[in-house]
Image (cartoon, grey):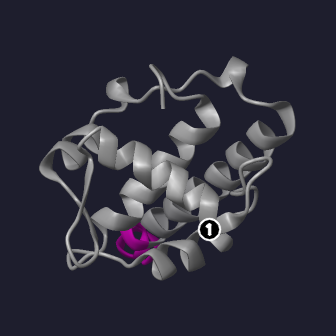
Amino acid sequence: MEGRADSGIEIRRILLLTRLQKSPRGLTMNQLVRDCSKVDGWNILGTGLWEGVRIVLQSLINDGLVALKTKFLITMKGRDYLADPLKWRLNVETAEEVERKLFWNSIYEIFDKALTRLRARSQPSSRKE
């Protein structure tokens, strides 16, 4: 990866970092590929699923955000990167239209589900009025 990643790659990097953050013991390449296959629009144009995951992982390793021991693990630098959206290299205008639409719709859906769950957890006491 030279310089700044395009938005499609950056979104994939954020998704992989998030998945690795939730797995304190790390994940194998097979586990990551299986997880990524569940995300609509994950495939990078012109590459297979396995190769696309490898490209994204390599960019994370090159930046010191992920380390490989027996499994892929997020580093402290990766946790800091994930916690600060100002460090993310997103540029929505440069992403290809179809790819951008698929990813943003998927992200909105995930956030909507999470927000619904948070609201459901915080409202039981107010419903009993």
Disc 1: which residue: 50
In the rendered view, tell whether residue 30 sits above or below residue 85: below
> In the image, residue 8 lies at what x, y percent?
64, 38
Look at 42% across and 43% down and name the residue there.
59
Asked if residue 91 is positioned above or below residue 51 in the image, the reply reads: above
Asked which quadrant contains residue 41, the reply is bottom right
Magenta span includes 79: no
Instruction: Confirm whether residue 129 shows in the render.
Output: no
Q: Secondary structure at mark 1?
A: helix
Q: Position of residue 65 (x, y in %)?
A: 26, 46
Compared across the picture, whether 61 is left or right of 76 comes to right
Q: Could you classify mark 1 by the number of other residues whose Cα lies within 10 Å: few (under 14), some (14-19), or many (20 or more)? A: some
For the stretch drawn in magenta, what is the main secondary structure? helix
Left or right side of 36 for 103? right
Q: Position of residue 12 (x, y in %)?
A: 55, 49
Image quadrant where residue 77 sits: top left
Quadrant location of the C terminus in the rendered image = bottom left
Image coordinates for residue 64, horizontal then vertical, percent: 23, 43
Specify start and end residues of the magenta stretch as a single range.
121-129
Asked whether residue 74 appears in the rendered view, the answer is: yes
Residue occupying the far left of the picture: 76
> Residue, x 62% and y 56% (percent of image)?
52
In the visual, does 112 lie left or right of 1? right
Tell me: 54 left or right of 27: right
Compared with 46, 37 (above or below) is below
Please name the residue shown 50% across and 50% down the image: 56
Given residues 116 and 59, the one toward you in this image is 59
